[in-house]
Amino acid sequence: MWGVVWGHTITCLLQDALNEVGIHPIFRTYDMPFFMLISGYFLSFSMKKYSFANLIKNKVTTIALPTIFWILLSSKFSRIYPGYYFLWAVFFSSVIMCLINKILTHKILQIMIYALIVIILHCQPYSLENLPYLFPYFVLGYYGYEWLLNSKVKPLYVLPIYILGLCFWRTDYNIWNAGADLIGGGTSLIYAILFRTFIAITGIVVAKGVFDLLYTYLIEKHPSVYFFFINCGKETLALYILHPIILGKFIEKIVINISQHYGHNILTDNHLLLGYVISPLLSCAIMFLMLPFLNWCHRHRYTNILFGFKL
């Protein structure tokens, strides 16, 4: 979650600057696929515990309803992903998988249908909530994330492959620039899809290894910092919803005032300082300040339902 807030903070601080900060495109290669992988993994557990009807109701009340409410509110304040496309991608992916698994019980048939859905999603010009890009990772997380957890593949061995891939990576290949329409995109789009899939999967393996090492170090040396990030993980939905509002309502205005005062956005003068010092510290501060507010919300009945509820 920190990487997402960090990346959006960079976007906010850059404003409309054409240059990109080095670490930002790296986040974009794996962060949303990783989230979808984890979301699919959690759905696999939920489907073992709850009935089909309860699962659908829970997805509506924990994702769809709060997303609609905050879209209406945040569209007034934020220019950073005001539609919350990722939450819609999780919702639609969950509903699709619940329906298919309700109809079909044979795993091979399920996977064949999901493969067909992925192909269909890549054969239409409108990329609904980036589902052509994100849905495959949701399916992979549902069926294969437990294998990744127990895999003998060492992230250290994958790291050079990921770095080599980054040397050839261009932002033209991402879903926002290249799209996903195979019919209209031709062979160059096929290459972009295969390459960004390769980058995402190797990035996920490396990121998981880094997070495992980081958490092991923090729990031994700095347990308070460890539990801070654990609490952030528990509040992923709320943090994802709220941080664009804070960036759009407050931070963006500060950047605009700075630009007006100095005649240009001085934050873009030093991209290393912006990307590796200011943005991570500011994103951490935003999450740190949001947690007490969320704790207060959870203690009150009517504010608690703003971030989802179960019937």
Image: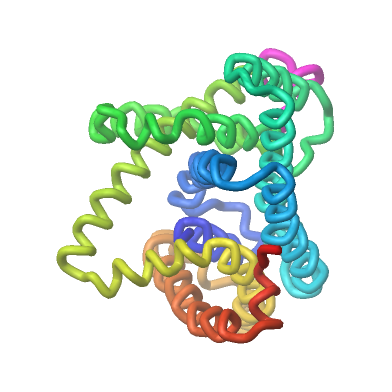
Relative height, residue 307 to residue 99 (above, below)? below
Relative height, residue 136 to residue 274 (above, below)? above
Provide residue 148's location: percent of width, then percent of height.
37, 32
Provide residue 244's location: percent of width, then percent of height.
64, 68
Taking the image as drawn, is residue 260 in sight?
no
The residue at the point 71 percent across, 82 percent down is: 302
In magenta segment, residue 186: yes
Provide residue 239's location: percent of width, then percent of height.
56, 67
Provide residue 219's location: percent of width, then percent of height.
22, 64
- Is 150 positioned to the left or the right of 261 in the image? left
Main secondary structure found in the magenta portion = helix
Relative height, residue 270 to residue 213 (above, below)? below
- Is 111 positioned to the left or the right of 68 in the image? left
Total labels drawn = 0
Which span of residues is magenta-colored? 179-189
Q: Could you say which quadrant of the image residue 119 lies in? A: top right
In magenta segment, residue 149: no
The residue at the point 73 percent across, 62 percent down is: 67
